[in-house]
Amino acid sequence: MKKVTLIVSILVCIISYGQRDWSSVNITSEKLSENIYVLFGSGGNIGLAIGEDNAYLIDDQFSPLSDKILAHVKTITDKPVKWVLNTHWHGDHTGGNENMANQGAIIVAHENVRKRMSTKQDRGGGRVAEPSPDSALPIITFNDKMTLYLGNGNSMHAMHVNDAHTDGDSYYYFPEDNVLHMGDNFFVGRYPYIDLNSGGDIDGLVSNVTMVLGIIDDETKIIPGHGKVAAKSDLLSYKEVISELRERVVTARAAGNSLEQTQKLGLSKEWDETHGQGFINAERIIEFIYKSAD
């Protein structure tokens, strides 16, 4: 029955995407510093950095929104969008790559993002992502870290982190502006999506969040993959939830409980009302942790 429910949910999502009225989506923005903005629309949050000569986007949502995104950028700066950097490979973050490249942008991402985008991907539950067009692929990749110098003394630090949401997750940090884009390693007020078919791992997620908490301060503005701009206190609360839930699931698994039995133990009950009402519910977060925790 669970498999049937999952398949139905996936079909509903596919049909909804195909019928989506993209004309109803509005692109809005929030200024985070003199040089950094976040753009909201439909899909992953977009970071916008204004350099001395060019504009830089971090992620680009869905293809039908590219014109709206570029039009909104022009209300903020007249600098051309010459660089697009992806936090990971999922389509709600890379769907506009081809359009951005066609208007002159250079696509950059971790090497695993290019690998997954260039080959057929099994998304689970019968979903298959076909290879992206060559023009949508990153043409510059990195395997660990990279620094871009934006001019006027500002920089952007790209950091590949532990496998967490996927195996190609990267953070983009602006030290001079004290802003960090964490991509889908951070879902504000929601359970995280750990994409097991893309190398996702709960232990990597906890480790990544712990690392970030050690380098940011109370004034840091965090752009999550989804949700409102957050602060260190929000990330600390997020870590407490996922860390405690991981410990509970691992303990139940070690006691001999099957996945189905563990899902019936109510291990996440105190957070389900606030964190489990979106894309990832209580059953799914338990499954992600059960299957990926060491």
Image: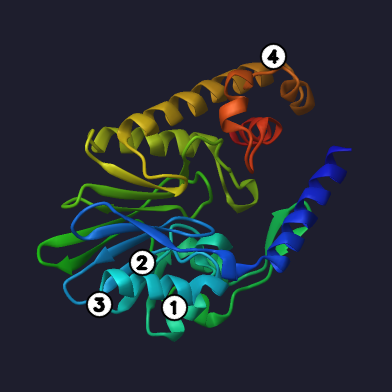
The residue carrying pointer 1 sits among few (fewer than 14), some (14 to 19) or many (20 or more) residues within 10 Å by Cα, namely many
Front disc: 1 or 4: 1
Tell me the quarter of the image containing the C terminus.
top right
Of label 2 and label 4, which has the lower sequence position? 2
Circle 2 sits in a helix, a strand or a loop, which is it?
strand
Of label 3 and label 4, which has the lower sequence position? 3
Residue with the mark numbered 1: 100
Residue 235 falls in image quadrant: top left
Which residue sits at x=58%, y=80%?
A: 133
Which residue sits at x=76%, y=21%?
A: 264
Of label 2 and label 3, which has the lower sequence position? 2
Circle 4 sits in a helix, a strand or a loop, which is it?
loop
- Distance between mark 1 and mark 4 Cα atoms: 51 Å
Of label 1 and label 2, which has the lower sequence position? 2
Of label 1 and label 4, which has the lower sequence position? 1
Residue with the mark numbered 2: 57
The residue carrying pointer 2 sits among few (fewer than 14), some (14 to 19) or many (20 or more) residues within 10 Å by Cα, namely many
- Distance between mark 1 and mark 2 Cα atoms: 10 Å
Image spot of residue 27 (x, y percent): 45, 63
Front disc: 3 or 4: 3
Q: Nearer the viewer, residue 125 or 275?
A: 275
